[in-house]
Image (cartoon, rainbow, N blue to C red):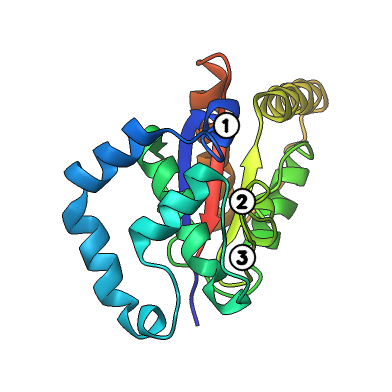
Amino acid sequence: MSSSLSVYLLDTAATRALVGSRDEQLLKVVRTDFADSLARDDDYFADAIEGGAPTAYDALHAVVHGGPFSDNPDHAFQYGYAYQRLCSLTGSFLDNACFTPHRGAWLSEVDEGLKAVGVTAVSVEDFSYGGPPAPVPSTWELGCGEWTPDRIARALEQFETARRAEAESGRAPSLEPEVEEAVSQCLGWMGHAARRPGFGVIGFRF
């Protein structure tokens, strides 16, 4: 079974603040301008909704209002998708070609590649094992993680330090081509964020 990552460039603090913001204008815009997208999602999850899971809009409403959330853990995925929808609406989608689709231990392999170039401040596995901001319920079906601006700044500093050391020693890490490409893509995400104060990366593993 394959997985994928959807990764967004955005103001991470402002995005987290949408949870519980009670922003009715935002909800109105989504309901009006993205009605077709909401309907498609409801059609895709029709069986779960028939079994009591919230609709896409109801889940989004709960996230924006900070609750109430269903007590049934089988319904938690809808709230994760609602938070992902907020990220897609307020952020910019980043190229994820190296991560969609992926199988097995690919994320940990890329993390090892990042370590090989000196980067330990961020991890792509963060996007797989975390969850959305509290109080939004978490679920194994949808991972969510965040690279804050501070972590990205540290990671880029680590990379530059390691690169200078490599230049002095004349020895560079040997990475498999596909891992090297994925590491480069991660560095590209961080480069985009570093050029915009307050911006970071939020990723979702499906």
Q: The residue tagged with tag 3: helix, strand or loop?
A: helix
Q: The residue tagged with tag 2: helix, strand or loop?
A: loop
Q: The residue tagged with tag 1: helix, strand or loop?
A: helix
Seen at 55% across and 42% down, the residue is 202
Query: Are the residues at dot 1 and dot 2 in contact (C-beta closer than 8 Å)?
Result: no
Give the label, 1 or 2, closer to the camera: 1
Amino acid type at circle 3 is Trp
In the picture, measured across the screen, residue 167 lies left or right of residue 40, that is right
Indicate the position of residue 104 as horizontal and vertical percent values: 61, 75
Real-space Cα separation, disc 1 to disc 2, in angstroms = 12 Å
Vertical side of 20 occupied by 69: above or below? below
User: Is tag 3's residue or tag 1's residue first in the polypeptide sequence?
Assistant: 1
Crowd around label 3: few <14 · some 14–19 · many ≥20 (10 Å)? some
Amino acid type at circle 2 is Pro
The residue to which callout 3 is attached is: 106
Real-space Cα separation, disc 3 to disc 2, in angstroms = 22 Å
- Specify the label residue 17 is tagged with: 1
Real-space Cα separation, disc 3 to disc 1, in angstroms = 32 Å
Amino acid type at circle 1 is Ala
In the picture, measured across the screen, residue 80 lies left or right of residue 90, that is right
User: Is tag 1's residue or tag 2's residue first in the polypeptide sequence?
Assistant: 1
Indicate the position of residue 47 as horizontal and vertical percent values: 35, 86
Seen at 61% across and 51% down, the residue is 132
- Seen from the viewer's position, the closer of residues 145 and 182 is 145
- Seen from the viewer's position, the closer of residues 190 and 130 is 130
- Specify the label residue 132 is tagged with: 2
